[in-house]
């Protein structure tokens, strides 16, 4: 469709240029009705050029962007920081689920001996703030995670989580995940959030 619009736009521009430059009697006869209405041949040519430019613009800008919108991940790529993000992943962190079409990037990573923490920025398209929390509350236990009342903030393993969205798995090492900073963003609908991941020996 974009190619067709582009070609038609160029053709209309070409015809408009002919009308604008060559305002002779033959063209004026062709546009006799326009002349009777007070329109000049050059005005008709300028109008056609304008229409052609609009068609070319639609072909180059609007149509491609509308086709890209059929890709759900394109909603996330318009968010700051996610322009070049890949499919959501937690790297070597075990069995961590993500919604379909989610993108992610790692914003921080700190290692202190055998302790390791990282923050994963995630964007999930076509979801809301009220749907992403139930997603993890449901999916993480299915992957072997159990809800945790503590989370090792500041390397303190006895720190309170503070909400129902912390989970842990295993022992020696113990893996922790916390769902944080959940927010909706536009253009969307998309939901942005942080997964804070910690490994303790």
Image (spheres, grey):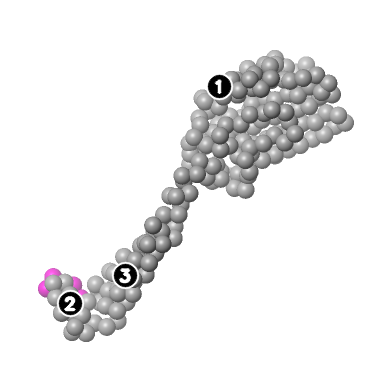
Gap between marks 3 and 2, in whole Å?
A: 16 Å
CA neighbours of label 2 inside 10 A, class few (<14), some (14 to 19), many (20+): few
CA neighbours of label 3 inside 10 A, class few (<14), some (14 to 19), many (20+): many
Q: Nearer the N terminus, badge 2 or badge 1?
A: 2
* Label 3 with label 1: CB-CB less than 8 Å: no
Q: Which residues are magenta?
A: 36-40
Q: Which residue is mark 1?
A: 134
Q: Which residue is mark 3?
A: 12
Q: Residue furthest top?
A: 149
The percent position of residue 119, horizontal first and vertical second, equals: 70, 34
Q: Residue at x 72, y 20 (%)?
A: 168
At mark 2, the secondary structure is helix
* Above or below for 69 versus 169: below
Residue 21 horizontal side relative to residue 178, left or right: left
Residue 58: image quadrant is bottom left
Q: Main secondary structure of the magenta part?
A: loop
Question: 7 or 160, which lies in front?
Answer: 7
Gap between marks 2 and 1, in whole Å?
A: 68 Å
Q: Residue at x 51, y 31 (%)?
A: 127
At mark 1, the secondary structure is helix
The percent position of residue 120, horizontal first and vertical second, equals: 68, 35
Does residue 174 appear anywhere in the picture?
yes
* Above or below for 79 versus 113: below
At mark 3, the secondary structure is helix
Question: 196 or 26, which lies in front?
Answer: 26
Gap between marks 3 and 1, in whole Å?
A: 54 Å
Residue 177: image quadrant is top right
Q: Which residue is mark 2?
A: 30
* Above or below for 171 versus 123: above
The percent position of residue 199, horizontal first and vertical second, equals: 78, 27
Instruction: Work out which quarter of the rendered image holds the C terminus and state it.
Output: top right
CA neighbours of label 1 inside 10 A, class few (<14), some (14 to 19), many (20+): few
């Amino acid at each position: 469709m974009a190619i067709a619009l582009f070609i038609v736009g160029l053709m209309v521009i070409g015809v408009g240029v002919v009308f604008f430059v060559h305002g002779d009697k033959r063209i004026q006869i062709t546009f006799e009705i326009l002349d009777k209405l007070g329109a000049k041949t050059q005005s008709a040519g300028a109008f056609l050029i304008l229409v052609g430019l609009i068609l070319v613009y639609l072909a180059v800008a609007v149509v491609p962007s509308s086709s890209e919108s059929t890709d759900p991940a394109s909603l996330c790529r318009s968010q700051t920081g996610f322009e070049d993000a890949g499919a959501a992943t937690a790297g070597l962190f075990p069995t961590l689920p993500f919604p379909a079409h989610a993108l992610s990037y790692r914003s921080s990573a700190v290692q202190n001996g055998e302790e390791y923490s990282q923050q994963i920025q995630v964007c999930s398209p076509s979801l809301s703030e009220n749907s992403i929390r139930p997603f993890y509350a449901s999916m993480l236990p299915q992957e072997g995670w159990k809800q945790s009342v503590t989370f090792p903030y500041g390397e303190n393993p006895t720190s309170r989580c503070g909400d129902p969205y912390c989970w842990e798995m295993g022992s020696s090492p113990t893996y922790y995940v916390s769902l944080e900073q959940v927010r909706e963003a536009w253009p969307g609908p998309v939901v942005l959030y942080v997964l804070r991941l910690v490994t303790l020996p």
